[in-house]
Image: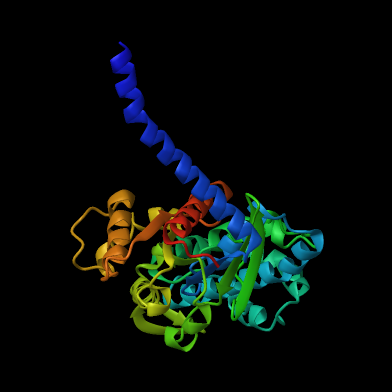
């Protein structure tokens, strides 16, 4: 009995000490991070990939919600988004030769004449707009929405048109998360988590060669790359000009350039495969083969999304470890769960590499 107990204690002691050692290392890392610089995260991705929405979510989760003055500032943004969506629909109705009433023939020109940021003009036309949204032409156009490019927030904003066109409209938090804002330049979101200071830098939609700007970010703790996987059937759209390059393939090419760059050779790389809600809807109507002819699987969410994930992982040729998550940036619960996991990964990788920023 005694010999057996002694043998067991000899076996267990190193395990206990190892756990204590790991715990101490984590504590020391945590303290050193607090005493030195903040944890810097770099947020990258193609335009409309959901980066700005992600940054707003992180602010809501880890900092604070939007104040009324900020909400009112988003009112004109959201109404401008609605104008752009309506103009796209009216153009598409004409292109698809969908019959519509003569009362809507001038609506496109009227919307185009509304000065940017002056939503009251849109409110003044709300009766005509609501009539258009109740028309057979509009519904036919929406049924065929997989045949043309439409803002990802279109259905949400169109469903809420009564609120948006109310003279006293104040955007909700969910409205703000759906707002599309042209993001050029750098935007930083700072927040504290578990006693640490995090700085998340959102680099505006990257269209140019990464070599022109990438060297400015050689001291980041982690690289977070977001991709809109629902755009697998869409062509590149830069400043309103539709090109021939597939949008998802363009995002894949940029991801490969950035992650494989020597500046990020020791940086933790995290991939957010975003807008899964839209991908689930679209895959039922548009085959993934339009983007990846080699795809042999079923056109259903699970198999198709895993294939897209594999294509991104396969693009990294130097055996560098990459962490990936499926996300819906407008879903606060989803982003909170995923981002907590991301922070744990970042701290673990920092501990293993002993690289502090």
- Which quadrant would the C terminus be assigned to in this image? bottom right
Residue 196, picture quadrant: bottom right
**Is the residue 72 above or below the residue 215 in the image?**
above
**Relative depth, front residue between 176 and 252:** 252
**Relative depth, front residue between 290 and 345:** 345
Whether residue 285 is visible here, answered yes or no, is yes
Residue 112 lies, in percent from the top left, at: 64, 82
Residue at (46% x, 44% y) in the render: 21
Residue 38 lies, in percent from the top left, at: 62, 64
Residue at (33% x, 28% y) in the render: 10
Residue 117 lies, in percent from the top left, at: 73, 77
**Is the residue 44 above or below the residue 167 in the image?**
below
**Relative depth, front residue between 320 and 188:** 320
Q: How is the image coloured?
A: rainbow
Residue at (26% x, 71% y) in the render: 317
Q: Is residue 335 left or right of residue 283?
A: right
Residue at the far top in the pictured view: 1
Residue at (21% x, 62% y) in the render: 295
**Relative depth, front residue between 53 and 291:** 53
Residue 310, picture quadrant: bottom left
Residue 255, picture quadrant: bottom left
Q: Is residue 289 left or right of residue 244?
A: left
- Which quadrant would the N terminus be assigned to in this image? top left
**Is the residue 3 above or below the residue 130 in the image?**
above
Residue at the far bottom in the pictured view: 212
Whether residue 331 is visible here, answered yes or no, is no
């Amino acid at each position: 009995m005694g010999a057996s107990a002694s043998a067991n204690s000899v076996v267990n002691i190193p395990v206990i000490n190892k756990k204590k050692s790991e715990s101490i290392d984590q504590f020391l890392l945590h303290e050193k991070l607090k005493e030195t610089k903040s944890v810097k995260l770099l947020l990258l991705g193609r335009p409309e990939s959901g980066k700005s929405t992600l940054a707003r979510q992180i602010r809501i989760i880890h900092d604070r919600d939007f104040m009324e003055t900020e909400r009112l500032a988003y009112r004109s943004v959201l109404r401008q988004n609605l104008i752009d969506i309506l103009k796209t629909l009216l153009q598409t109705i004409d292109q698809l030769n969908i019959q519509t009433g003569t009362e809507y023939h001038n609506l496109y020109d009227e919307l185009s004449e509304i000065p940017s940021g002056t939503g009251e003009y849109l409110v003044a036309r709300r009766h005509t707009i609501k009539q258009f949204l109740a028309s057979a032409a509009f519904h036919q156009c929406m049924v065929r929405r997989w045949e043309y490019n439409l803002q990802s927030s279109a259905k949400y904003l169109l469903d809420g048109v009564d609120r948006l066109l109310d003279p006293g409209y104040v955007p909700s938090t969910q409205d703000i998360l759906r707002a599309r804002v042209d993001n050029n330049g750098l935007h930083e979101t700072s927040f504290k988590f578990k006693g640490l200071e995090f700085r998340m830098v959102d680099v505006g939609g990257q269209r140019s060669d990464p070599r022109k700007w990438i060297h400015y970010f050689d001291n980041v703790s982690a690289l977070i790359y977001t991709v809109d996987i629902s755009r697998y059937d869409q062509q590149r759209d830069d400043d309103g000009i539709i090109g021939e390059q597939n949008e998802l393939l363009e995002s894949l090419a940029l991801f490969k350039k950035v992650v494989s760059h020597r500046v990020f050779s020791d940086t933790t790389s995290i991939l957010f495969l975003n807008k899964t809600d839209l991908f689930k809807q679209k895959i039922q109507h548009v085959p993934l083969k339009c983007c990846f002819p080699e795809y042999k699987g079923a056109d259903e969410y699970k198999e198709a999304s895993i294939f897209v994930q594999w294509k991104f992982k396969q693009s990294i040729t130097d055996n560098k470890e990459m962490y990936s998550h499926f996300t819906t940036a407008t879903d606060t619960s989803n982003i909170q769960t995923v981002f907590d996991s991301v922070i744990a990964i970042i701290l673990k990788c920092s501990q293993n590499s002993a690289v502090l920023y």
